[in-house]
Amino acid sequence: MTVTADPRAVRAFGEPPLPEPDQAPANAGPGYVERAQNEVDAEHRAQLFPPAKGESGAPKPGWYRLPAEPDKQGWWDGEQWIGEHLPADQPAPDEPVPPAGTTTVPLGSAGRTVRVLRQGLWRSSALRALKKDNDFEVWAEKCLWHNDYETWVEVDPTLDEVERFFTDYGQLDQSPGKS
């Protein structure tokens, strides 16, 4: 005896159920269940993944509802979710919201500033690069907020400016545990 599974019962975890054939309106016509399922699948995919695609096929940066928390929205940077999350019904700003404890620090002599993530968010690889090799570029790429690394590269600070930057950061940083 061969047992054929009802395709409505073989759905991945978290996927919405298929419509039942007996739920079709009287005037639905042939193919109602298939058309309805395509709509359900498209809606479900839109909830799980940011919908807009860039030229590379990756989702465009922007604010989207969070798949795991539909009552919140987050900033998708094209590769990952970054920054603080906001209520879904709140108007979103033009850019992502930096994490709490991010410090704005002057950089160089041209009056530019960059935002430094609080130390608890620094990657250990960034600390190794800084302490072992004095590699400020690797540190800046991993510890500056969002696209502020581009500002760091544009300014191309001298060693004296880097020293002043870290002195200023030490004075401005209000991370927990700092006195």
Image (spheres, helix red, strand yellow):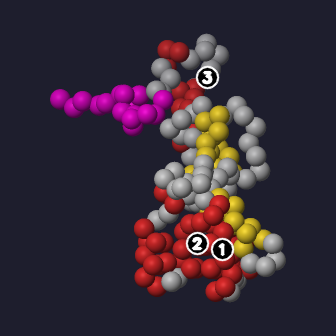
Q: Which residue position holds label 3? A: 29
Earlier in the chain: of badge 2 and badge 3, it is 3
Residue visible at 73% across and 69% down?
Answer: 106
The answer to whether any part of residue 101 appears in the image is: yes
Residue 12 belongs to magenta span: yes
Q: Amino acid at mark 1?
A: Phe
Residue interval drawn in magenta? 1-16
Label 2: how many residues lie within 10 Å, few (<14), some (14-19) or many (20+)?
some
**Above or below 135: residue 98:** above
Q: Nearer the viewer, residue 10 or 104?
A: 104
Q: Position of residue 16 (x, y in %)?
A: 48, 29
Gap between marks 3 and 1 measured at Cα: 69 Å
Gap between marks 1 and 2 measured at Cα: 15 Å
Residue visible at 43% across and 76% down?
Answer: 128
Residue visible at 17% across and 29% down?
Answer: 1
In this image, 45 relative to 153: left or right? left
Which residue is farthest left? Answer: 1
Q: Position of residue 75 (x, y in %)?
A: 64, 49
- Most common secondary structure along the magenta stretch: loop
Q: Nearer the viewer, mark 3 or mark 1?
A: 1
Q: Which residue position holds label 1? A: 165
